[in-house]
Amino acid sequence: MDADRPDLMSLANELLEVILSCDCLQHEDILSVRLVSSRLYAVCTSHKLWKQKALNRWSHWHNVAIDNDNWYEIYKKRHCLEQILLKEIDTIAENCHEEQIITSDYYGGIDQIIAKPNSVTSISSAMECLEEFLDNNKWDKLTMRYYARLVTKYLCHCRLEFDFGQFLALPNEEQSPELGFSLMAYWMTSSYKVDTIKDVSQHLDQIAEKVADLLKSKMVQLCFTYASFTRDDWITDHTESERILLAINQVLFTQLNFQGNRDNYYDENNVVIDKVLENRYGTTLTICVLYLAIATRLGVKLEFVSFISHFMLRWLSNSSANEEERYKYIDVLDGGKLKTRQECLEMVSFPPFHTLEIIPTKELLCIAISNLVNELQRSMPYHDNLLHLQLIRGLNLRLVLDSDDSSIRFMYLHLLAQVKAYDLKIIEDTLEKGNSQVFQMTPRFEKYLTTLLQKKCEKATQNQTVKLRSDYPQVVFRIGDTLYHKKYNFQCVVYGWDPVCSKGEMWIYQNGINQLNEGQNQPFYNVLGADGSERYAAQENLESIRLTEYIRHPELGRYFNCFDVITCTHIPNKQLSKRYPEDCLDAKQ
């Protein structure tokens, strides 16, 4: 060795740490280096080095305060958790390739991973791991990314189910509709972000401050300091309360122009509180939630009440009057107008017996979900997978709120069965509760559950059909080919094919297949469209094209692992390769 050239060991420990913290060195490399000498062992086990390696690998930790200084253990635990999660995700991908909807029994391995004494911490750590994985692997590992997103949504629901349990355990008067509907919104969108909850609260604070500023400009002095308000400080002066409500109306409906979204009621944005605040559109229910939250911040106590066509809020306007006249009702569909009971009843021809009665928050959540479910059922064609999934999510939340409702269980299981999905946990739990007489189960319902169990077992033992191109020379396009639909003008990628149309007579008639030149006796292809659609297209309507990047479709990772920029083809994952072995062999070559 040249004496004039310093070797590695001649460098200061600080420089060695800088070198070893380089991104090009993996943790396996550092563990190997530490075996060289006692000095390198000390350098390779320094907390400063492992902190830098951890921050380089998991960037979100830059904004997180961690009390533990043993960064080697922190790195080791996070790495092990990540590897266990990815291994389990690979298992889910293998087992669930044919599943349109993955039911909870397939997540048994994930349940075991997060089943620790502090389950909330375990869920949060697992979600952080997967979010980092998704952020760092945007252009490859499409299949792992696809199932990692599904597992993240499942973990989100696990966390929300825990939070709902704590929320529902509170006394009725402590169950805040604002928090309850925030949790409901996150459930329906399969997202859980504490920052979003804080943003919603801050946004409502800002609206309340606008109302307070408006009142001050009109020389109305609030009787409390905004920041120090508590629930024991309700304003008792009815005149002052009415001025506050009128000011809320002016800010919310005139200045900010919040409205009920009548045209597209079942849009999920109508029940997502942060989206309602952003778009200023929502259902009467979510607008009422916002109105109540703002009034609460300003010291006016309101209560939810039922009405035949929509929800209203009740305000005690005259505590000395009789029951019929002591309350006024806030109609958010009418700009927050204060109405008497008689004026409300005159809005309908035949008012129901229980109209304008107080609704507890739990019942309010159940009604909200039931209304959304009913609207989805009326509006949804059953071939719409997205709305079908939304409907199942809603029913799943309805079961979280009231697990003993047998009719909701039946509806949930029936909807799953329509896409050949069978939730083993719910089926077995329903049978157990029915046998224990938690709820009444008719012989017909019990027989249906037994049938679902049989179908679940039959599905598990079914062999996957293998299709060989060599048997069907008329099939021109291969799995992974990028095509252009000549009739409907969209780009797409092939993920399946049939030598002739396999759809039923009704579908063939509705789509005018017999009017095609080759009719139904030509190859048909399952394609994912760049417009987000999934279609079944005739060969004569398709032509091959070359793309320099993959088709962007939410289901792409279910079938393909990456995009080959040289051949301009999508490379099938191992699950699809088993079904179309010759296609996939050609694609890889």
Image: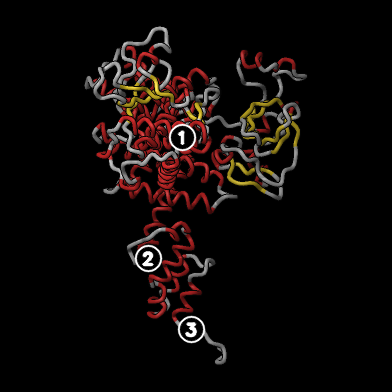
- Residue shown at 75% from the left, 19% from the top: 516
Residue hosting label 3: 11
- Residue shown at 47% from the left, 20% from the top: 375
Query: With respect to residue 405, does 553 lie above or below?
Result: below
Q: Would you say residue 152 is visible in this rendering? A: no
Out of 279 and 476, give the one closest to the viewer.
279
Residue hosting label 1: 272
Label 2 Cα crowd, 10 Å radius (few <14 / some 14-19 / many 20+): many
Alpha carbons under labels 3 and 2: distance apart = 23 Å
As helix, strand or loop, the secondary structure at mark 2 comes to: helix
Question: Of callouts 3 and 2, which one flags the residue occurring earlier in the amino acid sequence?
Answer: 3
Q: Is residue 365 left or right of residue 437?
A: right
- Which amino acid is tagged 1? Val
- Which amino acid is tagged 2? Trp
Residue hosting label 2: 71
Q: Nearer the viewer, mark 3 or mark 2?
A: 2
Out of 233 and 77, give the one closest to the viewer.
233
Residue farthest toward the top in the current orientation of the protein:
350
- Residue shown at 69% from the left, 38% from the top: 481
Find out whether the residues at labels 3 and 2 contact each other: C-beta distance under 8 Å: no
Query: With respect to residue 547, does 310 lie above or below?
Result: above
Find out whether the residues at labels 3 and 1 contact each other: C-beta distance under 8 Å: no
Label 1 Cα crowd, 10 Å radius (few <14 / some 14-19 / many 20+): many
As helix, strand or loop, the secondary structure at mark 1 comes to: loop
Name the image quarter holding residue 550: top right
Q: Is residue 95 left or right of residue 470?
A: left
Query: With respect to residue 321, does 227 lie above or below?
Result: below
Out of 418 and 489, give the one closest to the viewer.
489
Residue farthest toward the left in the current orientation of the protein:
436
Find out whether the residues at labels 1 and 2 contact each other: C-beta distance under 8 Å: no
Q: Nearer the viewer, mark 1 or mark 2?
A: 1
